[in-house]
Amino acid sequence: MMDFKERMKSGEVLLGAAIETPEPDIAEFMSTLGFDWFWIDMEHCPLDIKDVQTIMQAIGRSDVTPIVRVPWNDPVYIKRVLDVGAAGVIVPWVNDERDAEAAVRACRYPPNGIRGCGPRRPVWHEDFKKYVTEADGRVIVIVQIETREAIRNLRRILSTPGVDGTMVGPVDLSASLGHLGEPGNPEVQRAIKSIAEAHKGTDVCPGIASDPWNAQRHIEMGFRLVNVGSDMRFIEIAARETLRRLRRFLEERGT
């Protein structure tokens, strides 16, 4: 069976969901639904390192691959999430090859990088030396493409050794392109399509923070690492649809 990094390179479309809440029951339940991977979000959500570990423990019996979006391109954040067992990281605000190189180096042990050698949860389940000697090849490095500058430097970012995938952030990208709050703006959509096309002929897996309404279109564009929604968004969708249907029923009854 291929590991997740191999699946990213194989051309398979991998469907994920964002985990935004610190409640392990939600993460555990979500892990039973058939997602390939989870985006555990420390950047915009109230999750600290203990929450991240608890979420990974809650989903540990599933086949879901846990990938953590760290708050910033900072080796301290990256080191800590890897040491509690994340399979990889999503690194925000990567705007050029120097940012990409920094993200990769933070995920690699010396002499290939600067990751401090103190793995915690990973070596509960396998030999210490085996883990540390194989970790550089296992850890998944995904960099976010969310600014005009990142698009301008995309070719060099994609050619950075050690970058396994990218993740388009349509909302931040729309802001950077001058269309704050309008990810559906035609200019933004053209930019997103161009990002997908730029990956052709590379080994880097194109990813995007999508949603239930746009995921199919993004897959058709060529994105293969597709976040289709979040725990909170799925709760919202179900609640709104249930209330909409029942309100209409009550209106038709005249009550």
Image (cartoon, helix red, strand yellow):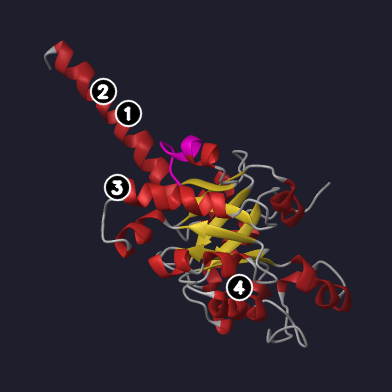
- Tag 4 or tag 2, which sits nearer the N-term? 4
134 in relation to 254, above or below: below
Q: Secondary structure at mark 3?
A: loop
Residue 131 quadrant:
bottom right
Q: As drawn, is 73 to the left or to the right of 245? A: right
Part of the protein shown in magenta: 210-217
Name the kind of residue labelled 1 in the image: Thr
The type of residue carrying mark 3 is: Asn
Q: Is residue 246 magenta?
A: no
Is residue 130 visible in the rendered structure shown here?
Answer: yes
Real-space Cα distance between discs 3 and 1? 30 Å
Q: Which residue is mark 2?
A: 246
Earlier in the chain: of badge 3 and badge 1, it is: 3
Amino acid found under the numbered disc labelled 2:
Leu
Image spot of residue 114 (x, y percent): 68, 87
Secondary element at image label 1: helix
**CA gap, disc 1 and disc 4:** 37 Å
Q: Which residue is mark 3?
A: 185
When the figure is inspected, residue 113 is found, relative to residue 69, above or below; the finding is below
Q: In the displayed image of the protein, which residue is found farthest to the top?
A: 253
Q: Which mark is residue 81?
A: 4
Mark 4 residue type: Val
Mark positioned earlier in the residue sequence (2 or 3): 3
